[in-house]
Amino acid sequence: MNEIINQYFDLSLMGERFGEVFHGFLITIELSVVAGILALVWGLALALLRQLPGKGFLPIRFATIAYIDVFRGIPLLLIILLISGSLPYLEFIPRSIRIPEWFGQPDPFWYGVMAITITYGAYMAEVYRAGIEAVPGGQMEAARSLGMSHGQAMRNVIVPQAVRKVIAPLLNDFIALMKDTTLVSVIALNEVALVGRDIQGETFRSSALTLGAIMFLLVTLPLARLVDRLINREQRRFTRGAPRVEAL
Amino acid sequence: MQPMSTPTQERAGDGPELDGPVLKLEGIEKRFGGLEVLRGIDLDVKRGEVVCVIGPSGSGKSTLLRCINLLEPPEKGKIFLAGRDIFGSRDGGVGKSNGGVDFLRQRVGLVFQQFNLFPHRRALENVAMAPEKVLGQPGEQARSSAAELLDRVGLGDKLDEYPERLSGGQQQRVAIARALAMGPQLMLFDEVTSALDPELVKEVLDVIRELVADGMTMIVVTHEIGFARDVGDRVVFLDKGAIVEQGTPAQVLDGPREDRTKRFLGLVLER
C-alpha cells in the first residue's frame, strides 16, 4: 500500500514539482483553447460546405465529405507526426509557416494546433451536420419563401438553431480534444504529459503524472457536468412541448 | 381591429402590365417520382382578387401554392408575376433563373399550415428579419414597421414574446404579419387554420378578412367552405392535380356542375 502511495501520490514530490507541472498544464490549456476554437470554426465551415445546394456545388460537397471521412479515420497521432515531420522541410512554403513561432509559442505548439484542428474539425463538422439536419425543413422553407438566399437562411435561421441544439455534443468533443492534446508531447511540446514523464524518468515516481491527471479532472469534470445539465435542459424543453404544434 | 393598409411596394422592375393579372399560370405540371401531382394548371389571378382553392386531400392544392412560390419548382409550365416571365423566355419555360426566383419570392407571401415561425427569434424579430436582410431596410425602420404590422394583427402586446409562448392562433397571426412585412403583391395561404384548435380559427380568419377588405390579392387553400363562400371572388375546385371546376362561390359551392365537385361538397358539408 505504501508503495502505491509513494509511486502515485507522493505529496512531497507533488509539492516540489507543482510549479513545473502547473506550467505544463497551462500549455495544455492554451493548446486546447486555441485548437478548440479553430476546430469549432473549421468544423462549421465544413458542415456548411457540405450543405451547399444544387448540382453546381456537387464537387465541393463530395470533396468535403471525403475530407471528413478521411480525417475521422486517421489517428490524430499520425497527423501530428505527418505535419511536424514534414512541414519544416517543404521548402516551397515560406519559413514562417514551415516553422511557425507565432505569439511566442514554439513550433510544436502550432503543429499540434494544426493537427488537432484538421482532425477535430472533421468530428465537429459531423456534430454540426446533425444539428443542421435536426432543424425542421419548414424553417428553411419559411426563410426562402421570404426571399432569403440559401446563405441568408443558413446564417439567420438554420445555423443559430442548429448550434443551440449541438452545444452539448460540441462540448463533449472539446473534452475529448483537450485530453488528446497530450499526444502533442511526442513532438516535444512541454505540456503536462511531457513534464510529468520527464519527472517520472528522473525520480522513478509517477506522482507528477498523477498531479497532471488531477489538474485535468478539475477542468473536465465540471465540463462533463455542464454537458449533462445542457442535455437535460434540452430534453425538458422538448417534453414540455415547446414546439407548439397542434397537429402533425 | 384597424383597417389594414399593407405596404405593397412597387419596386423597380415590376411588370409593365399593371392592369394585367398579378399572377398567370400556364400549364403547370409537377410530379413526385412517378406520381403526377399537378397536370397542367392554368390560372389567372387579377389584382385584388381572392381565389379560394378547395379539393380533397391529395388533390395538389398545397403543391400548387408551393409551385407558385417555387419551393417545389414545376417541371413544366410558365409563371408570370406582374407580367414578368419568372423562368425567363429561354427554352420555353422552366429553367433555373435565380433572378426570377428572388423577384417572385420577394413579392409573393406564403403562410404555412404549421406557421414555421423562427423559434429562436421574438415575434418582432420574426417579422422584421426579412425586410432587414433581404430588402436591406435599416434595422430601426424594419422593426417599427414590424411593430405596426403586429399591432394590426392584434398582437401589439406580444412583440417581445418567443413563438413557443404564443398560442397557435397568435403564432399564425405573427406568420401573416411576417409575410406582409415584405410588401407582397400576392399572398398565398396554405390551409392556415388546419393546425389550429377550433376556438383559435376565427381570430386568424378575421385577420385574413381584414386583408381582403383592404384589397390584397390572394390565393387561399382552405377546408373552411363557409369562409370560401364569404370572402372568395372565385372558388377553384381541384381534384387529382387538375382544375375540375371554377366560378363564383355561388356557382361552385351552391350549384356545382361536375359530379366530382358535388361528391366532395356533399362529404364536406355533411359534417
Image: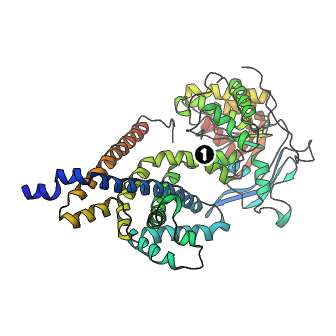
Chain containing mark 1 = A
Q: Which of the two residues, B13 or B78, is positioned nearer the viewer here?
A: B13
Q: Position of residue B128 (x, y in %)?
A: 69, 35
Q: Which residue lies under the disc numbered 1?
A: A157
**Residue A32 drawn at (x, y percent):** 42, 56
Classify B125 as above or below A37.
above
Give the left or right position of residue A206, taking residue A109 as reference: left
Q: Nearer the viewer, residue A24 or B118?
A: A24
Q: In this view, does A26 lie to the left or right of A102?
A: left
**Quarter in which the N terminus of chain A is drawn:** bottom left
Q: B106 or B29, which is in the foreground? A: B106
Q: In this view, does B145 lie above or below B70?
A: above
Tell me, yes or no, if residue A1 can be seen here.
Answer: no
> Which type of secondary structure does the marked residue at label 1 adopt?
helix
What amino acid is at disc 1?
Val
Kindly identify the residue that appears in the image at 22 percent across and 67 percent down. Answer: A201
